[in-house]
């Protein structure tokens, strides 16, 4: 048996006393010293981190000296232009628009001027050009999406279709699929004003875009039937007039929820289809729950009557009570 | 840049005053005293902390004074420990030498030391010091038994222990200054190491440190501390006795003690009077000098007798050829060495600080703090060789 095995464990000594003192039990001088010590440690860590960062930067500079990069940028001709876009513009359009000189090198390019060329086209909302050494120019585009189209005739030239974005910018539009363009409603009741080489943005397009987006997302059959959206009464009455395939004039109130108005329109259309011999002439959705509707008829029709009022027998106007279609499911 | 020096604070938390010395210790084992701080003690009774906040404020003000005087911050603390709660006991152990050729190995010495230190303590008490006495190999004294030949190895330890709560209070007062206690040293060992020489300790000497609230003593034999102890009686009791005996206030009694107190009665004329204040102002009155001397000498005599009684059989005048050495604030009392010589039956003298101590620190009241700094040197000697002798840069250039 080992001799050590019979030895009792040593008794506790003063060194077993914990020397950690709650800061609240410290005197003012002790707390000051503690704060000083903490700041010293923090400063040391900061100094070490700064030194490490500095060393890393030095290493980076040594590994890839800036003179070398500049030399590569000025000596090597541009080889490639890459494009990243959220729209439809393609690489060829970018190359055509930038019109880069042959054998140009990265460092000789004036990125601000090139960016201005891209932005000159209304279809481009934002553009970022980046030099990727040694010989690549990276182009990143953010494009406008068309909301509607309009026909414009400038001078003696033949009329041409232009596109209008949500922010009212009018532009020619490139590379869009014809199906997409054909699905866009036409704009009416707007006056184009020249601005530089293009046109000034059209006021009120955000409202139009909201109506069309609501129709496209919530009632696509209705949206497909929209042919013309007129802004003629927008500024004065706050109303949008829409011509659809079935109704020559539908009036939307811009102050009310478009979804509710579309729901009422859908209900009206459903009712109207039950009487195919009496096509609708106009529907006014701008009066809240009461929807004045005019039918195409050969009878001498009295002036439009509010649907809440009693209608004459076999009359031209259909009384409608629309409280229950506030949440119509399309 | 890596510092090659350590700033050590030697702190004595006494009953009447707190003393702090700041020492700069170099790796070359050179110690310079660079700062002194003192503050009147508050919240300390008989060497024990009774009011943490008051004791902390007093101690920290002394530490701040020392730091301001030194012009630098203290890195670590060597703290003197005293108090009536400290006790000691002797524990012996012996082992048979394990090697076949009877050569003492390191394992033998380790085993016997661990056996001697392995005594359990009552609940709530902790060890402050394990003081090893010389080894005995087959009965003969040997300082280091390893590689010597013998059959039986003996060693005894004088273990000093105290109440954990009181020791912790002392260290926490220092920790409240956001600095750690590196070493806790018995006050008697600190002052004893300073005022006695190695030769005296080898021959046998009794060192007494009479402070304001306690009297610490250490008996040296064969070069090491043989027995230590603390009496919860000190110079403050002399003052108290005078205040009660003469019916004066404590401050007046303290003044009388300092001016007229003695360790032995010298005045023969009972009619010889001394003045309380000395300027015949209102309240000034006369007291018999002999009475004052009788009161102070009686208490001094009693202190020495109690110490002698506590030392018991381990003390005889023959065992301390180097006599009795006195230090501490109360040791300045005239005639106290005569009283010690009479009680212990051995020559007595007032302890003197070594020559390297500057004139302003030679007062007996500084002997404990100076002794603590003296311990730092012996600690440094016991440590392993320094790894960074001249810092990183000098090491680089040295190897280049």
Image (cartoon, rainbow, N blue to C red):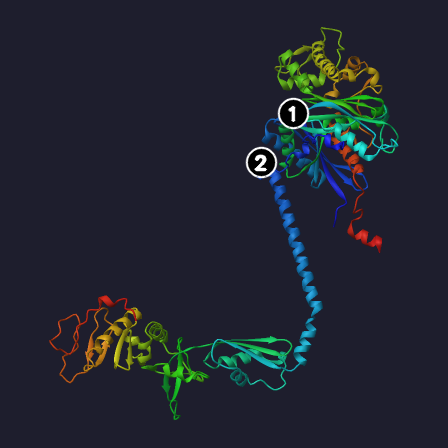
Closer to the eye: label 1 or 2: 1
User: The residue marked by circle 1 belongs to what chain?
Assistant: B
Which residue of the protein is positioned furthest toward the top in this rendering? Answer: B270
User: The residue marked by circle 2 belongs to what chain?
Assistant: A
**Corner quadrant of residue B52:** top right
Is B26 above or below relative to A2? below
- Percent across and percent down for residue B136 are 84, 26
Find residue A327 and name its label.
none
- Percent across and percent down for residue B57 are 61, 33
Q: Residues within 10 Å of mark 2 (few under 14, many from 20)?
A: some
User: Dot 1 lies on which element?
Assistant: loop
Is A225 on the left or on the right of B63, as rendered? left
Quadrant where the C terminus of chain B lies?
bottom right
Find residue A25 and name its label.
2
- Percent across and percent down for residue A281 are 22, 81
Q: Residue at x 69, y 61 (%)?
A: A55
Which residue position holds label 1?
B122
**Corner quadrant of residue A28:** top right
Is B117 on the left or on the right of A93, as rendered? right
Judge by depth and name the residue closer to the eye, B81 or A244. Answer: A244
Is B134 on the left or on the right of B253, as rendered? right
Judge by depth and name the residue closer to the eye, B321 or B195. Answer: B321
């Amino acid at each position: 048996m080992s001799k050590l095995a019979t030895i009792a464990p040593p008794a506790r000594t003063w060194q077993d006393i914990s020397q950690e003192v709650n800061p609240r039990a410290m005197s003012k001088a002790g707390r000051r010293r503690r704060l000083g010590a903490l700041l010293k440690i923090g400063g040391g860590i900061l100094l070490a981190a700064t030194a490490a960062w500095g060393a890393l930067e030095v290493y980076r500079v040594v590994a890839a000296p800036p003179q070398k990069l500049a030399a590569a940028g000025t000596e090597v001709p541009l080889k490639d232009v890459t494009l990243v876009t959220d729209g439809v513009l393609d690489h060829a359009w970018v190359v055509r628009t930038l019109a880069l000189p042959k054998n140009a090198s990265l460092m000789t390019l004036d990125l601000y001027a090139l960016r201005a060329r891209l932005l000159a086209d209304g279809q481009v909302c934002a553009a970022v050009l980046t030099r990727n050494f040694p010989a690549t120019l990276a182009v990143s585009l953010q494009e406008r999406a068309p909301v509607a189209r309009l026909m414009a005739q400038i001078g003696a030239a033949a009329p041409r279709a232009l596109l209008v974005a949500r922010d009212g910018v009018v532009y020619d539009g490139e590379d869009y699929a014809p199906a997409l363009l054909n699905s866009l409603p036409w704009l009416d009741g707007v006056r184009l004003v020249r601005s530089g080489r293009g046109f000034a943005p059209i006021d009120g397009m955000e409202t139009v875009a909201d109506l069309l987006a609501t129709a496209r997302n919530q009632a696509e059959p209705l949206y497909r039937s929209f042919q013309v959206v007129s802004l003629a009464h927008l500024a004065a009455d706050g109303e949008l007039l829409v011509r659809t395939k079935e109704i020559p004039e539908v009036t939307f109130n811009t102050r009310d929820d478009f979804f509710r108005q579309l729901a009422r329109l859908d209900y009206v259309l459903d009712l109207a289809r039950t009487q195919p011999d009496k096509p609708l002439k106009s529907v006014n959705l701008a009066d809240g729950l009461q929807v004045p509707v005019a039918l195409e008829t050969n009878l001498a029709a009295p002036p439009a009557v509010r649907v809440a009022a009693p209608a004459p027998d076999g009359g031209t106007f259909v009384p409608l009570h629309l409280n229950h279609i506030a949440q119509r499911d399309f | 840049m890596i510092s090659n020096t350590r700033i050590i604070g030697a702190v004595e938390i006494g009953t009447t005053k707190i003393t702090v010395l700041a020492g700069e210790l170099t790796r070359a084992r050179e110690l310079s005293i660079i700062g002194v701080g003192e503050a009147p003690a508050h919240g300390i009774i008989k060497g024990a902390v009774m009011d943490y906040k008051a004791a902390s404020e007093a101690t920290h003000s002394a530490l701040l004074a020392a730091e301001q005087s030194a012009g630098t911050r203290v890195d670590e603390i060597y703290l003197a420990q005293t108090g009536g709660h400290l006790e000691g006991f002797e524990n012996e152990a012996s082992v048979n030498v394990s090697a076949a050729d009877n050569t003492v190995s390191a394992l033998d010495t380790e085993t016997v030391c661990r056996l001697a230190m392995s005594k359990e303590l009552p609940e709530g008490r902790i060890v402050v010091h394990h003081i090893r006495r010389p080894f005995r190999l087959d009965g003969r004294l040997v300082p280091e038994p390893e590689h010597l030949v013998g059959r039986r190895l003996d060693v005894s330890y004088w273990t000093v222990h105290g109440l954990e709560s009181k020791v912790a209070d002392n260290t926490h007062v220092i920790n409240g200054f956001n600095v750690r206690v590196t070493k806790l040293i018995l006050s008697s060992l600190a002052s004893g190491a300073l005022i006695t020489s190695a030769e005296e300790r080898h021959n046998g000497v009794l060192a007494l440190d009479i402070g304001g609230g306690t009297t610490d003593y250490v008996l040296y034999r064969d070069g090491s501390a043989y027995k230590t102890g603390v009496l919860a009686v000190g110079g403050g009791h002399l003052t108290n006795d005078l205040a009660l005996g003469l019916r004066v206030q404590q401050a007046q009694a303290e003044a009388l003690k300092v001016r007229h107190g003695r360790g032995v009665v010298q005045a023969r004329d009972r009619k010889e009077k001394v003045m309380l204040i000395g300027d015949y102002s209102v309240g000034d009155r006369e007291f018999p000098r002999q009475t004052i001397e009788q009161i102070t000498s009686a208490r001094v005599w009693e202190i020495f007798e109690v110490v002698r009684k506590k030392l018991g059989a381990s003390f005889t005048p023959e065992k301390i050829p180097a006599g009795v050495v006195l230090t501490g604030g109360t040791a300045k009392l005239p005639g106290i060495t005569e009283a010690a010589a009479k009680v212990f039956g051995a020559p007595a003298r007032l302890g003197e600080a070594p020559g390297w101590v500057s004139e302003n620190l030679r007062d007996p009241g500084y002997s404990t703090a100076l002794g603590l700094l003296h311990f730092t040197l012996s600690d440094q000697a016991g440590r392993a060789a320094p790894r960074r002798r001249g810092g990183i840069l000098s090491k680089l250039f040295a190897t280049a």
